[in-house]
Image: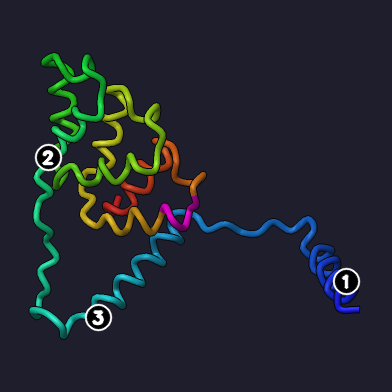
Amino acid sequence: MKVAISTLCILFMSFFAYGKQVPTPNLNQIFEEYFQLTKFQSIENKHLTRADRDRCRPPSGRGCFKTACSNLGAFECDDDNEIDQLLRACRGNYDGDCITKSITFMHKFEYDDLEEMVTLANSCRGVFDLECVDFMCERLGSFGCDDLEEIASVNKKCAGY
């Protein structure tokens, strides 16, 4: 009897859900949700530390340029033109942590040439809060944050662009 009732419930729910697409949040909605969460957390934690709460994090020790070059092939970062392109792309990056974080979501072929790494480094410009990148990629799911274009959009949104 219980099996029949649960089967009817499943059929009933699937009948009404048939043809209706479950809405997926877009980047703006996810970013706003993250912004609201961090706003509340900073208000909650305000009394625990200094009044102005210095949010600067210490540098990781690996700069953007070093991180970018180490993730490229041996012949992708070895002449003046290539080095200049990466150095320009790394301007405004805090360190190499954004690149390191971003590549964890992608397959190696998404960032294995100079043009792709320049795109990734440019998207990391101004990204301070790596938790934002984590949060947005978690909400977008593994297929919503697994290629260069998607992670570049997330990085730019987290940087405030």
Q: Amino acid at mark 2?
A: Gly
Question: What is the spatial separation of the Cα atoms under label 1 and label 3, in whole angstroms?
Answer: 48 Å
Q: Amino acid at mark 1?
A: Leu
Give yes or no for contact between labels 1 and 3 (Cβ–Cβ under 8 Å).
no
Residue 8 numbered tag: 1
Mark 2 and mark 1 lie on one chain; the one further toward the N terminus is 1
Q: Quadrant of the N terminus?
A: bottom right
Question: What is the spatial separation of the Cα atoms under label 2 and label 3, in whole angstroms?
Answer: 32 Å
Question: What is the spatial separation of the Cα atoms under label 2 and label 1, in whole angstroms?
Answer: 59 Å
Please provide percent x and percent y for residue 152.
35, 41
Residue in the picture at 32% in, 43% down: 102
Q: Residues within 10 Å of mark 1 (few under 14, many from 20)?
A: few
Residue in the picture at 10% in, 68% down: 54
Please provide percent x and percent y for residue 149.
41, 37
Give yes or no for contact between labels 2 and 1 (Cβ–Cβ under 8 Å).
no
* Residue at disc 3, secondary structure: helix
Query: Hey, which residue is sitting farthest bottom in the picture?
Result: 47
Establish if 100 lies above or below 27. Answer: above
Q: Residues within 10 Å of mark 2 (few under 14, many from 20)?
A: some
Please provide percent x and percent y for residue 43.
24, 80
Q: Residues within 10 Å of mark 3 (few under 14, many from 20)?
A: few
Q: Which residues are magenta?
A: 137-141
User: Principal SS element in the magenta part?
Assistant: helix
Q: Amino acid at mark 3?
A: Ile
Residue under numbered circle 2: 63
